[in-house]
Image (cartoon, grey):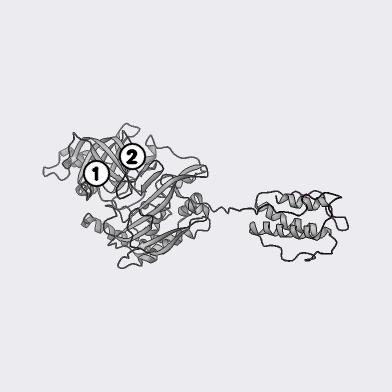
Amino acid sequence: MPRRSPLLGLLLLLATVKASAAVFVVPADSELIDRADAIVIGTVSEIHSEFTVEGPIVTNIDIEVEEVLKGSLERSVPLRLREDGGVIGDFFTAVSGSAHYWTGNRALIFLERTGDRRWRTWGMSLGKFDFVRDSDQRELAVRWATGQADVLAWSPEGHPHEERLRDAALFLAFIRSHGRPAPLQPRLEAAVGGEGSAGYFVDDVRAEELSFLVPVTDAHYPPSAYTSGTFRWKIFDEGGAASYRANGTQSGYDAVGAAQRGLAAWTNDSGSNVNIQYGGTTSAGFVQDSINTIVLNSASDVPSGSVGYARWFGSGTHTYKGETFYSIVEGDVAIKSGLTVSQKVFDEIVTHEIGHTIGFRHSDQGTPASNEAVMKAILTGNYGATLGPWDIEAVRHVYEQTSVLVPPPAPVFTDDPLVPRVTVIKALHLIELRNAVNSWRTAAGLAPVAVWTDPNPAGVTIKAVHILELRNALDPALRAFGRTPAFSGGVAAGQPVLAVHFQELRNQMK
Ligand SMILES: [Zn+2]
């Protein structure tokens, strides 16, 4: 685990004072340069995902290195990044906040050496910048949100609204000169200014003006608009639940309570079918093992720059509202050890990471966007374990509560069909209809009729009221199943009850 630098500690302290915290704690650029083990400019030549011995899928990203700005790397051999997550056939592993690469992608990449001597992007998507051109053909370096169409441009102070784009040439010059004992060149000196006030920031271009940002104008958002990729749990649709277990606790916090509250926050929204339950404690870790685990005090699983981390695993696909989703089968959360935030913020971190494991993206990194959410990339600290408006909108779009009604089987009748002027109507026919109607009312979630006229019809003349109360009782039950009741002919007091009146009641329920 990287040593926490004094600056990071300061950021956390400030975050506490302001009652806000960051899932990504974004360092100043100069600190990012210092903390990265290497920095390169390169182009992605190949990407392939593979299963690992430990289980989770990883993705190898080969980079043709064009320039090494820091560190000792061979430029002649491709640099291989190994990032968590990936898709192989119907299997996938996803991680929150991971950097997104594609073949041919030229990028500025800050690198982190992992424990097993491999390379990965520093701080997930924090360490990756793409090069784009604005309308004046000026080259900019842009830190994007993962897989989303919005820019991440967090200031070192964590102000969410301060989108900062970087002039690529000046930013690269700053990186190249950073930490060198030699004095800055005069031109750069003017441009750079000093710590935290780098002159390479571009404030005259807004992210929306970058050419390939496509604004979403359709207000009817599909479920996938709210998810990170197309991942969701299928079992909730089938009335199932997922059990999450807590591993450990964290000094100074009601950590297990935070896990319980976070699970309840998502489960208890009345408009969705999400059902994630607290299943007790476990010694299982932040690994793919078919156990949904919330590690509450992790010294090693949370990448640099983050206070929480989530992974989710799946197998197979399913269709939901016309879209194909990978079916999530496991979600794991890791909360960084040694936190200094408030209990409320701790709750919000846990709730946020659990939200990732049920598929949700960051609320402010895509469309529709909102800062009113526990799923905001940088937490507001306002919500704790309570869903914000965006979260509620998301959970109801992706896991809409649809009561799946199953009609009762077609009833077996005596003397079916009834033949007019042939079949003698019996009390048994009436009793069977009453039982069948009550089966339909029960299946539709309606109370069965408790008291019928002439509850024991044996020996009683069949009357219009018997038919009318059957029709009235059956009508709402049929409508609950999307059927439109259709009864021919009125039944009036004093008029004879016909076989057709019985038969059409029967037919409506078949
Ligand atoms: Zn997140």
Q: Ligand 1: does it lie within 8 Å of the C-beta at label 1?
A: no
Does 73 appear above or below 497?
Answer: above
Amino acid under label 1?
Answer: Phe
Q: Quadrant of residue 69?
A: top left
Q: Position of residue 46 (x, y in %)?
A: 29, 35
Number of residues whose C-alpha sits closer than 10 Å to that of mark 1, classed few (under 14), some (14–19) or many (20 or more): many
Q: Distance of mark 2 from mark 1, alpha carbons?
A: 26 Å
Q: Residue furthest right?
A: 494
Q: Which residues are magenta?
A: 483-498
- Residue 290 visible to an observer of this rendering: yes
Give the residue number, with chain letter if any, for mark 1: 110
Q: Residue furthest left?
A: 182
Q: Is residue 281 magenta?
A: no
Q: Quadrant of residue 298?
A: bottom left
Residue sitting nearer the eye, 355 or 491 = 491
Q: Is residue 489 magenta?
A: yes
Q: Which mark is residue 204?
A: 2
Q: Secondary structure at mark 1?
A: strand
Circle nearer the N terminus (2, 1): 1
Q: Quadrant of the N terminus?
A: bottom left
